Amino acid sequence: MQHPSGSQIDNPEPPRLFLPLPVAASFKALRQKAETWGGGWQGEGLGGRLVIPVLAGLRRGFVGYAVSADEGSKGTHLEFVEEESDLQVHRPTLIVLLIAAAAALTCLVVPFVPKLLPLLPPSVVLCLATWLFIVARLRNSGLDEFMTDLKDEADEPAGE
């Protein structure tokens, strides 16, 4: 099985989350958090389908999960099983990175081809600007962050 980030998953155990709420309140919190994230929730009995937006480096898209709930004496255990993912590379960012790669190649070739020396300063500036504006600002958000947000919201006392 492959994770949306592209890495292989060695442990096929689906992620689980404990919320100190009854099932109905857990699903309500899940729906509200999904809407806050720009996703969606469709509940059916003791489960449902969750779709959330995902950022994985240069890739963006949506991932769908089948969610099942087990109610215990102290709260609800939610289990998330990935059903589908639709991730695509953010093309404008990729194009800028390819241009920066060409500039970096120019920096590497200048010692061997002295005629390219006038291109060295703009190439260095382009490489640094790409680092500052794209690579340093890459974000990842997915199920782990969603579950952390959901857990934090469920742990807050009512009325805050």
Image (tube, helix red, strand yellow):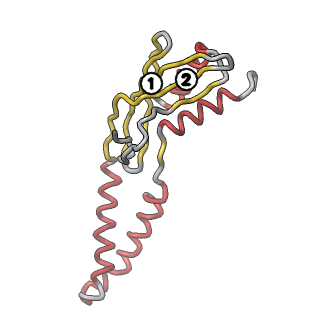
Which amino acid type is shown beneath numbered disc 1? Leu
Q: In the image, residue 51 lies at what x, y percent? A: 42, 27
Q: Residue at x 43, y 66 (%)?
A: 129
Q: Residue at x 42, y 28 (%)?
A: 81
Of the pair 109 and 13, the residue shown nearer to us = 13
Relative placement, left or right, of 53 versus 77 is left
Q: Cβ–Cβ below 8 Å for labels 2 and 1?
A: yes
- For the N terminus, the image quarter is top left
Q: Is residue 93 above or below residue 123?
A: above
Q: How many marks?
A: 2
Q: Disc 2 marks which residue? A: 30
Q: Disc 1 marks which residue? A: 50
**Mark 1 surroundings: few (<14), some (14-19) or many (≥20) residues within 10 A:** many
Lower position in the chain sequence, tag 2 or tag 1:
2
Q: Residue furthest top?
A: 45
Of the pair 69 and 110, the residue shown nearer to us = 69
For residue 153, which quarter of the picture?
Answer: top right
